[in-house]
């Protein structure tokens, strides 16, 4: 890694984690949480003010618990700490980040680290997060989340002070976690538009700009996607907001720098958002390893399947949404079922497998497994019918009869029927896929009873 | 869109950290969850029955807000936190306990305690500042800052020994000194001189 200009994932994560130490009293809170766990009562609270420079310095490059001294970055020095303003009423000027400088392989590096939301100081940070309305636009970029834009504006004096230095060094790394990641986006755009060579690292950042203004494209044009490292846990709620029309800097999951990692907790939880959890996920790995560990489509499929199994109401949340989305959800659940079932070893399904392909295989194979699997199929057909707006009640005995017939007597005919139905779906998909899908499923049933 | 964008709502009611597992934390969480139902029922009642029912959701939010946990979190403070010197000493010693692990990772020649004292009046802050300047081995000049009508006195005092008992003894002495000057020790950290 030292041969490139980029920070290693561990360095970037520690830098983002250390940015919180600029908040006065966070050192005590953090140490308390490390010693007694983050669920322990009586943790000292940080206050809305700036921490002493020496305390920040100690934690970033000295004897702190997550200091950079523990990585290969031993010659780094903290250049300055800077304040930022959050909130609307009862605005707070608090420690918001630091500027770090170091030399590696004869290249000069500068780091701008920005902290994320801390509800412990009261409402100011939360109010900034909640200001999702528009009304703010960044020159050359377009509309921006109002809360993040206001915070960025409060950092502009600091950015003006370091601009000359930023242009003189070989690379400037902008780093942040959560709200800090969102603000780091804007800091990176600001410095890049004024001539600095930028690399941006965000952990669990929410969305910043809008798809209407093509924020993702602007980031690519200005910073370059190859210079953006966006790390997120797939079950971290903060990375999912604000919803459309807001968009991430690199929204495409297939982009190698959109590093979507498996969450430590497998359901949506704020615990997946903690910077310490991100540090645990990426500790000791390089970017290449992280990319190889990125969540694959199959993982998401498994998650959809397990969520569907765990909850009777999982599919209900998709009632009323666009049909193509409903079908893709059903497809994910089915693919998840296939991936999770050992009996399907050797059956490779790619993204092009249709809903009917998958349904055919599940119907055919699941019956053979156990009664539990059969009940899954019954549940799936019931839920699918419900999702597609059909009030079909399918009993266990009817299904068993159907499957027995299917598996033992009509294997070939079943496959032919599915193949025909698929062709028909493809040919007349524009008419009404809902009718075709429902009709095909029921027709198969009646044919074989 | 609004609901989906605000997973932060419980945080506004102080539901973070260990307090979210307390009875009160769970109660506030339940109140937040029931809010939409209460609102819908009240609006229906207001439509069908009496218009005053529409005020209930507002009262409900106010009640939940008053029950919120972590009320002491906020922008700062301007009055004393501790009821007695013993309480102040107990918390200060627990702070030493928290920070002492750092000493093992320190390599600098000079190690010092960064201390912050809280004073309600300028006179008390000045007395304490003078006392520390005259009697303690200070690492850098004692600073005094005003915020929200109260005063913070920040001092860096050299550590002659990094033995835990010695540090505890020094903290005990400084808490004594603070209370003699009508102040309290509000924060401490153990630092070292880093070469910049």
Image: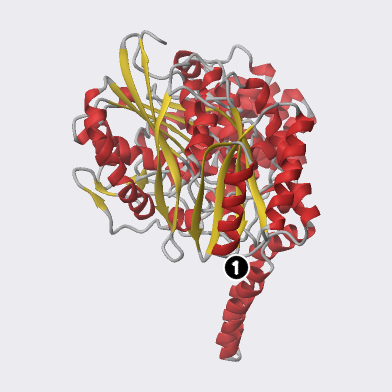
| Count of marks, rendered view | 1
Residue sticking out furthest to the bottom? B50
For the point 32% across and 24% down, the residue is A227
Who is closer to the viewer here, A307 or A169?
A169
User: Seen in the image, is B166 located left or right of residue A256?
Assistant: right
User: Seen in the image, is A81 located left or right of residue A408?
Assistant: left
Who is closer to the viewer here, A436 or A1?
A1
Who is closer to the viewer here, A390 or A309?
A309
x then y, percent, for residue A201: 40, 29
x then y, percent, for residue B19: 72, 53
For the point 49% across and 13% down, the residue is A72
x then y, percent, for residue B12: 57, 59
Secondary structure under badge 1?
A: helix
- State the quadrant of the N terminus of chain A: top left
- Whether residue A37 can be seen here: no
Residue to which mark 1 is pinned: B36
Who is closer to the viewer here, A37 or A259?
A37
For the point 50% across and 18% down, the residue is A290
User: Seen in the image, is A399 located left or right of residue B43?
Assistant: right
Relative to A383, residue A92 above or below: below
- State the quadrant of the C terminus of chain A: top right
x then y, percent, for residue B138: 57, 38
């Amino acid at each position: 890694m030292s041969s490139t200009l980029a920070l290693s994932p561990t360095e970037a994560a520690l830098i983002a984690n250390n940015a919180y130490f600029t908040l006065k009293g966070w050192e005590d809170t953090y140490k308390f949480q490390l010693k007694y766990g983050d669920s322990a009562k009586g943790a000292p609270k940080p206050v809305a003010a700036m921490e002493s420079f020496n305390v920040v310095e100690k934690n970033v490059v000295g004897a702190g618990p997550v200091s950079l001294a523990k990585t290969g970055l031993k010659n780094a020095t903290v250049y300055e700490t800077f304040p930022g303003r959050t909130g609307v009423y009862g605005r707070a000027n608090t420690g918001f980040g630091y500027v770090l400088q170091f030399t590696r392989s004869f290249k000069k590096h500068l780091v701008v680290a920005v902290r994320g939301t801390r509800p412990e100081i009261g409402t100011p940070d939360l109010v900034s997060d909640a200001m999702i309305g528009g009304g703010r636009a960044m020159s050359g970029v377009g509309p921006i989340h109002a809360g993040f834009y206001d915070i960025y504006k409060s950092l502009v004096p600091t950015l003006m002070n370091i601009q000359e230095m930023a242009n003189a060094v070989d690379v400037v790394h902008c780093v942040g976690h959560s709200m800090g990641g969102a603000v780091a986006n804007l800091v990176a755009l600001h410095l890049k538009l004024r001539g600095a060579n930028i690399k941006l690292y965000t952990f669990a950042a929410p969305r910043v700009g809008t798809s209407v203004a093509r924020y993702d494209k602007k980031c690519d044009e200005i910073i370059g996607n190859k210079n953006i490292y966006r790390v997120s846990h797939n079950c971290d709620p903060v990375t999912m907001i604000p919803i459309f029309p807001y968009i991430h800097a690199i929204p495409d999951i297939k982009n190698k720098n959109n590093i979507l990692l498996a969450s430590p907790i497998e359901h949506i939880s704020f615990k997946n958002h903690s910077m310490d959890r991100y540090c645990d996920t990426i500790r000791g790995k390089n970017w290449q390893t992280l990319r190889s560990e990125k969540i694959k489509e199959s993982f998401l499929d498994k998650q959809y399947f397990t969520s569907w199994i765990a909850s009777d109401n999982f599919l209900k949340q998709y009632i009323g949404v666009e049909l193509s989305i409903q079908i893709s959800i059903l497809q994910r659940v089915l693919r998840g079922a296939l991936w999770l079932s050992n009996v399907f070893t050797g059956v490779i399904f790619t993204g092009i497998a249709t809903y009917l392909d998958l349904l055919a295989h599940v119907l055919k194979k699941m019956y053979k497994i156990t009664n539990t699997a059969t009940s899954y199929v019954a549940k799936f057909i019931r839920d699918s019918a419900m999702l597609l707006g059909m009030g079909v009640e399918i009993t266990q005995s009817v299904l068993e009869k159907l499957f027995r017939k299917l598996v033992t007597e009509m294997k070939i005919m079943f496959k032919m029927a599915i193949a025909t139905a698929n062709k028909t779906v493809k040919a007349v998909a524009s008419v009404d896929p809902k009718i075709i899908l429902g009709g095909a499923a029921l027709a198969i049933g009646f044919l074989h009873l | 869109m609004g609901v989906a964008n605000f997973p932060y709502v419980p945080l506004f009611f102080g539901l973070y950290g260990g307090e979210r597992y307390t009875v009160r934390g769970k109660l506030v969480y339940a109140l937040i969850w029931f809010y939409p139902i209460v609102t819908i029922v009240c609006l229906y009642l207001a439509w069908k029955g009496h218009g005053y029912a529409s005020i209930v959701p507002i009262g409900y939010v106010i009640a939940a807000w008053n029950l919120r946990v972590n009320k002491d979190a906020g922008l700062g403070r301007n009055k004393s936190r501790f009821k007695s010197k013993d309480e102040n000493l107990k918390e200060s010693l627990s702070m030493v306990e928290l920070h002492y692990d750092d000493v093992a990772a320190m390599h600098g020649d000079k190690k010092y305690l960064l201390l912050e004292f809280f004073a309600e009046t300028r006179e008390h802050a000045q007395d304490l500042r003078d006392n520390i300047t005259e009697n303690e081995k200070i690492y850098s000049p004692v600073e005094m800052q005003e915020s929200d009508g109260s005063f913070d006195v920040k001092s860096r005092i050299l550590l002659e020994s990094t033995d835990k008992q010695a540090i505890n003894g020094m903290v005990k002495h400084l808490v004594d000194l603070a209370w003699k000057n009508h102040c309290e020790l509000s924060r401490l950290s153990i630092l070292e001189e880093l070469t910049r």
